[in-house]
């Protein structure tokens, strides 16, 4: 079996400013003053790790990611920090972290009913789990991915692509799962509105995230055909504004859990 294609850090960073706003908003709600150990799970190219390190410069700050390309960019960005190759889905640490930061990564992992309590168990007493996840599977941008995948000549190839994204639980689910793990929980959702250059920019945005499971399974020629149909499908939902821009609505779910006792 061929290795799963790596994540593309350069493509991801094409929208770095927009992608860094949610972790900045998440970090602002972390109720810690002097944590000793912090880890950024699914740290990507280090843009979110940089925020954590700037907020808590006296802490031991680490990053973990499954992508060698992302880690290479993170190490160049923050050469004084420790970045480790690893799988968030199997990660745990009995010694405990004061802050576990997970920005836009847990939506790729299954079984949140087990995952979130497991992460909470890797916190020290008073430690904080801070999570941000895209909650956009019902947005036109993502409905169109599934429709184009099912309607095109690649339908058989793409039958399992949508399964790579986990279905996000309800507010009550996360409050219950983490409450049962001994945490005090703060949950909210924010819909960001990104003014992008044109319709094609929406496809470019998602090539490094939501579209990736579909495009990874296609040849270069099929990828072009898929993107063309995708743009046709989303066009009615993202009309061009008076200044030529299109507005990408992007709901994100935030969870901040503090382990008590």
Image: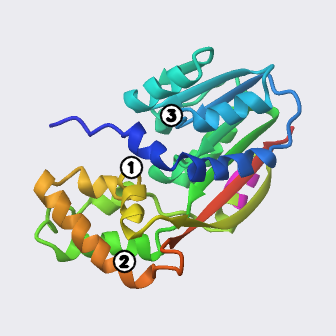
Residue 155 percent coordinates (x, y):
16, 68
Q: Is mark 2 on a helix, strand or loop?
A: helix
Q: Measured along the vertical axis of the image, is residue 196 above or below residue 131?
A: below
- The structure residue drawn at horizontal position 48% and vertical position 74%, both measured from the top left corner, is 244
* Quadrant where the image shows the C terminus: top right
Secondary structure mostly seen in magenta is helix
Nearest the viewer among 25 and 102 is: 25
* Quadrant where the image shows the N terminus: top left
Q: Which of marks 1 and 2 is nearer the N terminus?
A: 1
Residue 113 percent coordinates (x, y):
57, 54
Asked whether 16 falls inside the magenta stretch, the response is no
- Magenta region, residue range: 175-179
Q: Name the disc covering residue 234, or none.
A: 2
Nearest the viewer among 156 and 191 is: 191
Residue 110 in sight here: no
Q: Name the disc covering residue 208, or none.
A: 1
Q: Is mark 1 on a helix, strand or loop?
A: loop
Marks 1/2 in contact by CB < 8 Å: the verdict is no
Q: Mark 3 points at which residue?
A: 45
């Amino acid at each position: 079996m061929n290795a799963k294609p790596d994540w593309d850090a350069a493509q991801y960073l094409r929208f770095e400013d927009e992608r860094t706003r949610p972790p900045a908003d998440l970090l602002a709600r972390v109720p810690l003053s002097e944590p000793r150990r912090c880890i950024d799970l699914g740290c990507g190219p280090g843009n979110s790790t940089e925020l954590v390190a700037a907020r808590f410069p006296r802490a031991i700050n680490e990053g973990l990611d499954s992508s060698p390309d992302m880690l290479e960019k993170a190490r160049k960005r923050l050469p004084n920090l420790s970045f480790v190759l690893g799988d968030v889905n199997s990660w745990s640490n009995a010694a405990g972290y004061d802050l576990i930061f997970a920005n836009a990564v847990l939506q790729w992992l299954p079984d949140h009913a087990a995952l979130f309590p497991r992460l909470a168990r890797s916190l020290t007493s008073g430690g904080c789990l801070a999570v941000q996840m895209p909650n956009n599977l019902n947005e036109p941008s993502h409905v169109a991915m599934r429709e184009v995948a099912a309607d095109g000549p690649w339908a058989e190839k793409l039958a399992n692509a949508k399964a790579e994204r986990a279905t996000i639980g309800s507010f009550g689910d996360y409050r219950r799962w983490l409450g049962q793990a001994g945490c005090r929980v703060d949950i909210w959702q924010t819909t960001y509105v990104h003014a992008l250059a044109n319709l094609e920019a929406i496809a470019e945005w998602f090539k490094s995230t939501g579209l990736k499971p579909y495009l990874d399974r296609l040849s270069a020629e099929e990828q072009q055909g898929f993107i063309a149909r995708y743009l046709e499908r989303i066009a009615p939902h993202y009309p061009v504004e008076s200044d030529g821009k299109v507005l990408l609505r992007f709901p994100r779910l935030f969870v901040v859990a503090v382990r008590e006792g």
